Amino acid sequence: MNYYCCILFIVIFFLVGYPELKNSFSQIPSLFKEANKMLLFVLLFLQLITYLSDIWLTWVLINMKEITVRLKDIMKITILGVLGGQVAPIMGSAGITYIFYRKLKIPSANIFFMITMWSLFVFLSHSLPFLFSLIFLPKLFFAFVPKIVVILAAVFFLTIVLFLYFL
């Protein structure tokens, strides 16, 4: 059944989305000509830092479970997991990561732990800066939420991160 849903989605994309995107493809070279080259290099550098920090997080989680995996394999798993998460945000990262961990003969319970913790840390690393930035807004978009609630939520998330780190 899932196979047919995927085929249906692809057909709908090519019928509806492709004609709209076809005109945009010709504009890509002009966008690169207009773009600030220094900013593009900064963005590429920041993306590299993102991949390196994800590799480091994966290495830490694997070492927490006292599993021996080569750094090369950790890099493959992490990069493919991040790409899978960008292509299929719901379960792409977890699925790809699970498949590659199983090829390394890691038990399912350890894989579940590493995927869950990795997802939690990534979620918190994205949500904490957002919550802290709400403190500095002159007026909250959600005016009914007092700033103290935002501060307490940020402190709560930080406490969870520290608790899980030292667990």
Image: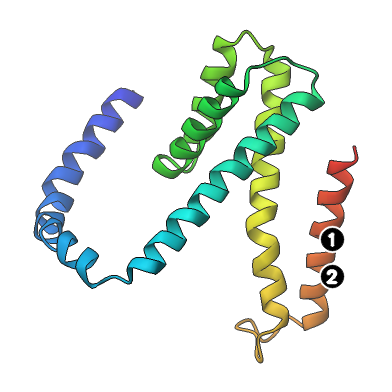
Q: Please tell me whether mark 1 sits on a helix, a strand or a loop.
A: helix
Q: Is residue 24 above or below residue 102?
A: below
Q: In the rendering, at what x and y percent does residue 62 appear?
A: 72, 25
- Read off the residue under disc 1: 156
Image-based side of 13 in relation to 55, left or right: left
- The circle drawn on residue 165 is none
Q: Quadrant of residue 23?
A: bottom left
User: Do tag 2 and tag 1 residues touch (Cβ < 8 Å)?
Assistant: yes
Within 10 Å of disc 2 (Cα), the crowding (few <14, some 14-19, many 20+) is few
Horizontal arrangement in the rendering, residue 31 relative to residue 117 (left or right): left
* Camera-side residue of 93 and 63: 63
The residue pinned by badge 2 equals 152
Residue occupying image coordinates x 66% and y 87%: 143
Q: Quadrant of the C terminus?
A: top right
Residue 132 x/y as whole percent: 72, 72
Disc 1 residue type? Phe
Residue at (72, 37) in percent of width and height: 117
**SS at mark 2?**
helix
Q: Amino acid at mark 2?
A: Leu
